[in-house]
Amino acid sequence: MIAERKLFESKKKLAMGLAGDVAACLSNAITDRGKALLAVSGGTTPTLFFNFLARAKIDWARVTITLVDERCVPESDERSNARLVRQNLLEAEAAAATFVPLFGKGHADRLGPFDVVTLGMGLDGHTASFFPGGDNLAAALELEGTKRIVTMSAPSVPEKRMTFTLPVLLDSGFIALHIEGAEKQKVLATAELPGPVLDMPIRAVLRAREPVILYWCP
């Protein structure tokens, strides 16, 4: 469920606001447990947010970062989310953090629970790699499922993907949904209406009991 809607005038102000909130959550986790775990989404939307978060003054040496989902491609590929994170988040202050990639031999399946999860949303209503028509979509959304990571192939995406499952992502102290633009705002409004979850998988997150904070700008 969307517990709070934070609306910003610009992409820069949104990125700064989200980075500040995420940094505060990570810092609190470090104070409470001596470490923090962050799972971020890829794509083009979070780049500016990554740039601001990388400069947050927290004890990054105690932070582990992983990905919500990933394309099954090497980091040399321009579409790699791991490459995006290394180039835009693992710099400045955040260079001291530990990064565990999802694709490869990073053993990301051993991570959790998360302190912070940041999600995006596509125009087709997907989030993470929960794509409409995905071959493992039902398994990925199963709240009682025991799998932590599943692969996903779908007609709308060229590569096979890997994604943390819904129960793993929901097991987080702070869940942010970061979207930008009027078109995605309309998609979100449609997703909040009654309708099949498999048609718009973001509905699985919106209908869960765990609170989600929306970050949006035009």
Image (cartoon, grey):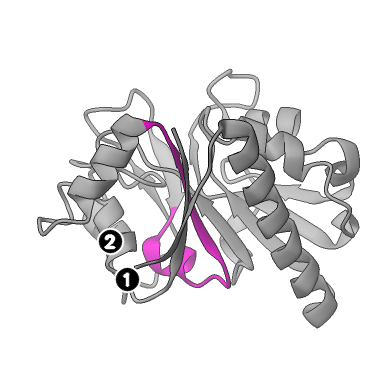
Q: Is residue 60 above or below residue 111?
A: above
Residue at left 24%, top 36%?
A: 124
Q: Is mark 1 on a helix, strand or loop?
A: loop
Residue 125 seen in the current view: no
Which residue has dot 1 on it? Answer: 208
Question: Crowdedness of circle 2 by 10 Å Cα count: few (<14), some, many (20+)?
Answer: many
> Residue 30, position in %: x, y?
81, 72
Residue at left 34%, top 68%?
A: 1
Q: Do the residues labelled 2 and 1 touch (CB within 8 Å)?
A: yes
Residue lying furthest left in this view?
A: 195
* Amino acid carrying mark 1 in the image: Ala
Residue at left 66%, top 28%?
A: 83
Q: Is mark 2 on a helix, strand or loop?
A: helix
Q: How far apart are marks 2 and 1 (CA)?
A: 6 Å
Frontmost residue, 8 versus 211:
8
Residue 71 seen in the current view: yes
Q: In this view, does 25 lie above or below 152?
A: below
> Residue 5, position in %: x, y?
44, 57
> Residue 112, position in %: x, y?
60, 69
Left or right for 69, reference 18: left
Which residue has dot 2 on it? Answer: 204
Q: In this view, does 11 lie above or below 192?
A: above
Magenta range: 164-181
Left or right for 156, reference 159: left
* Amino acid carrying mark 2 in the image: Ala
Frontmost residue, 18 versus 70:
18
